[in-house]
Amino acid sequence: MQNPWLNIPLSEYESHMALPRVDQAAMTAAEFAAALSLFTPESVAVIGCAGGNGFDAIPASTLRVVGVDINPDYVSLTAERYMGRISGLEFHVADIQSDVLPFTPVDLIYASLVFEYVALAESLENLARVCRPGGHLVTLLQLPSATMGALTPSPYGSIQLLTPLMRLVPPSELASLAESVGFQLESSKTVTIKSGKSFVIQAYCRL
């Protein structure tokens, strides 16, 4: 079965995420900026880079930037947006749960709203191979809501293709599996956005 992410136009995904009742684009970009500021990496990989949300916050001190996405159209469009604007930029079309990731290890991996759509154990094993010892993995997970569905309704119908694939991952489950492949949990915080949905941001160190 084809992955539904391959059938969602980038324009619809970005418009959905920017809707006031969804309100997730700014939050995920802000958490990426916070991770860059905290860890000051020379190299970073953004997993599920989509259209490059948050790339504008990448400082000049980050010399290598790796964008990874399963959708080749996303990768192509993001390359058009940022090639020449960010130094050391490279892109890879890959499914992190099944593909060996074709880039050398980085100091920081940022994976926002990714683990809801992939096999956890396999994905974490692949990410561990491309995070250098002493480097960090920062994850962002959506928490269940008592009043809202996992996918917020929107006029962009293609987003609903994700419904059969999406599974909200308990942060404790992610932490346990991450530890099994060499990621040690360093910090965890919860963020609630204007829509009322809450998210957990976890930072791990690669042992």
Image (cartoon, helix red, strand yellow):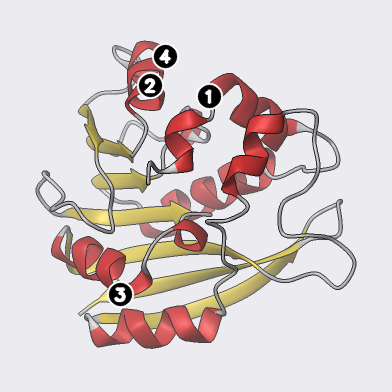
Estimate the spatial distance between the alpha carbons at disc 1 and disc 4, rounded to whole Å. 13 Å
What residue is pinned by disc 3? 121
Pointer 1 with pointer 2, Cβ within 8 A: yes
Q: Earlier in the sequence, mark 2 or mark 3?
A: 2
> How many C-alpha atoms fall within 10 Å of the one at disc 2: few (<14), some, or many (≥20)?
some
Q: Earlier in the sequence, mark 4 or mark 2?
A: 2
What residue is pinned by disc 1? 10
Q: Which mark is residue 81?
A: 4
Estimate the spatial distance between the alpha carbons at disc 1 and disc 3, rounded to whole Å. 27 Å
Q: Give SS at disc 1.
A: helix
Q: Give SS at disc 3.
A: helix
Determine the residue positioned at 59% across, 20% down.
11
Determine the residue positioned at 42% across, 33% down.
6
> How many C-alpha atoms fall within 10 Å of the one at disc 1: few (<14), some, or many (≥20)?
some
What residue is pinned by disc 2? 73
- In the picture, residue 119 is in which quadrant? bottom left
Estimate the spatial distance between the alpha carbons at disc 2 and disc 3, rounded to whole Å. 27 Å
Determine the residue positioned at 79% across, 55% down.
193
Q: Give SS at disc 4.
A: helix
Estimate the spatial distance between the alpha carbons at disc 4 and disc 2, rounded to whole Å. 12 Å
Q: Earlier in the sequence, mark 4 or mark 3?
A: 4
Estimate the spatial distance between the alpha carbons at disc 4 and disc 3, rounded to whole Å. 33 Å
Asked whether residue 184 is in view, the answer is no
Q: Earlier in the sequence, mark 1 or mark 2?
A: 1
Provide residue 135's location: percent of width, then percent of height.
24, 65
Pointer 1 with pointer 4, Cβ within 8 A: no
Furthest-front residue in this view: 1
Is the residue 164 above or below the residue 171 in the image? above
Left or right, residue 24 beside residue 126: right
Amino acid type at image mark 3: Ala
Is the residue 102 above or below the residue 166 in the image? above
